[in-house]
Each structure stands twice: as structure tokens, then as C-alpha cells.
Amino acid sequence: MSEKYRRLAVFVDRPSEESFLWLLLESTDDPAVWLDLEAGKDTYSTWMEAHQAGNKALPAYVDDEKLGPLADAVFEDGEPEEE
């Protein structure tokens, strides 16, 4: 089975003037479409604190640190490729 990299990103949102919240997103095959994977439960007083917390959550989506965030390749019909 061939594998490809998951396109993951840490995004920081600002729900209020005093707080920041991290989100983990994944791009679909359409690069303009991103799906929410996870959002932090805590808010932070600075953008950098929220970004760093999101980066700490990101490794949970990586099975092998040497290879990175791999995903099974899928055919155009959306079905997983068979081994």
C-alpha cells in the first residue's frame, strides 16, 4: 500500500480580546477545504502560548516520529487503496 503525508496545521483563533485558542486542522484533497481535527479546551493569554500548546498536541497524529504524519493513499472514488 502506498502512503502519503497528511497535511496537518496548527491554527490559533481569538475568541475574545483576552484569549487565544488552538485548533488542529487537516487539509482534504481540495486544498481550499480544511477539516477541524481537535480544539484546545483551555484558552491562553497570548497567541504564542496557544500556538505552542497546539504544537504539543500535534504529535498525537503521528504514529512514527521518523516518518511523520502518514495516511493511507486513497483512490479518486474516496475508497482506501487495497494492499
Image: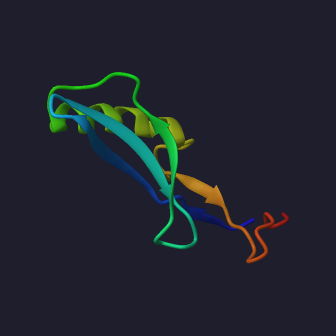
| On screen, residue 69 above or below 74 | above
> Which sits in the foreground, 1 or 32?
32
The location of residue 41, given as percent across then percent down, is 41, 23
> Which sits in the foreground, 74 or 34?
34
Q: Quadrant of residue 24?
A: top left
Residue at (46%, 43%) from the top-left corner? 65
> Which sits in the foreground, 6 or 45?
45
Residue at (72%, 68%) from the top-left corner? 74
Residue furthest out toward the top: 42
In the picture provided, is 68 more to the left or to the right than 13? right
In the picture provided, is 71 more to the left or to the right than 44? right
| On screen, residue 32 above or below 36 | below
| On screen, residue 34 above or below 47 | below
Residue at (42%, 40%) from the top-left corner? 58
> How was this image coloured?
rainbow
Q: Quadrant of residue 14?
A: top left
Callout count: 0
In the picture provided, is 17 more to the left or to the right than 15? left
Residue at (50%, 53%) from the top-left corner? 67
Residue furthest out toward the bottom: 76
In the picture provided, is 65 more to the left or to the right than 22? right
Looking at the figure, which quarter contains the C terminus? bottom right
Q: Quadrant of residue 19?
A: top left
The location of residue 53, given as percent across then percent down, is 30, 31
> Which sits in the foreground, 72 or 46?
46
Residue furthest out toward the right: 82
Looking at the figure, which quarter contains the N terminus? bottom right
